[in-house]
Amino acid sequence: MKWEDLQVYKPLKKEELKSVHKDFIKIIAENLSQYGFQPVGRKLIKQSHDLFHIIHIDTRGRWSVSDNFKTEISIASIYDTDTFIKNQELTGTKKLEDLIPQIRNHYRITQEYQLLADFLTRKLVEDVLPYFGKYQSSGDILLKRQNFKMDKLTELTERNENLILFCALSNHNESNSSEILDKRITEIKKNYPTSPELPEQEVLRDKIKAQDWINIDEQLRENKTAIFKKLKLHQP
């Protein structure tokens, strides 16, 4: 029996939801482990060169434990400490329904959750893994930069600026990284002139303009070490 063939779904009791959430994510994590994904909380993360491919299964309810969940697809730089150390929103996010035809991004977790986990796994393998395959490294991101817009934030809070910035830094791309930092510094000076981030951003911009890639690379390596330690990920 497949989940999509079911006609009747039996609801779970509220006191069952928390443990079922963990089991639901565990099943999907085990199914995707053969593709290199490692579980980190509600996220499944795979390293691809200098990028992370992320599947975020968000079971958080607004006010209480919910029987609904949504799935967020993300691509992030392995050097992005804003995302992984400061716990800001994920970068390069996509709605599940934008990548998988005829799917809804909100499903209820019921007593048939094991079948639902199997269904979601199959869809992720069929449609999301090929999407990740288009972006194996930061170089792929820069070549297809038009697919990661940096205009006003959408409801997804894509934060693509950070994705492009760290991809540019890891490729010693002065034009893209300087453009982003110049814009960011101008905005901080205008809106948050006393922010401690201002001197940090200015120092980084100055290193880029001085072509000081040795020190920039060292900082990126430190970022990576801190991120892998925080996420408790095994490096391939």
Image (spheres, rainbow, N blue to C red):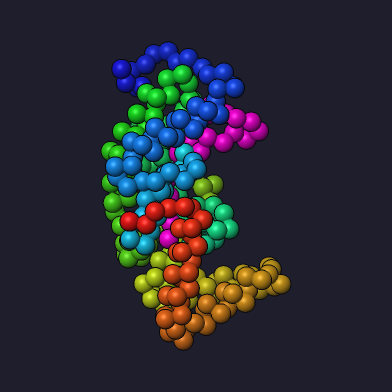
Q: Does 170 sit above or below residue 65?
A: below
Residue 215, position as x, y percentages in the image:
46, 80
- Whether 60 is among the magenta residues is yes
Q: Identify the residue shown where x is 36% and y is 37%.
A: 30
Q: Position of residue 68 (x, y in %)?
A: 52, 29
Q: Quadrant of the N terminus?
A: top left
Quarter residue 97 falls in: top left
> Is 134 situated left or right of 229 in this image?
left
Q: Residue at x 57, y 54 (%)?
A: 87
Q: Residue furthest bottom?
A: 210
Q: Nearer the viewer, residue 78 or 73?
A: 78
State whether residue 202 appears in this view: yes
Outermost residue, top side: 8
Above-or-below relation of 43 to 172: above
| Residue 92 appears anywhere in the view | no
Where is residue 233? Give x, y as percent: 43, 53
Boundaries of the magenta span: 58-78
- Numbered marks: total: 0
Q: Is residue 31 above or below residue 48?
A: above
Q: Quadrant of the C terminus?
A: bottom left
Residue 112 placed where, x, y %? 42, 20
Relative to 85, say whether 218 is above or below: below
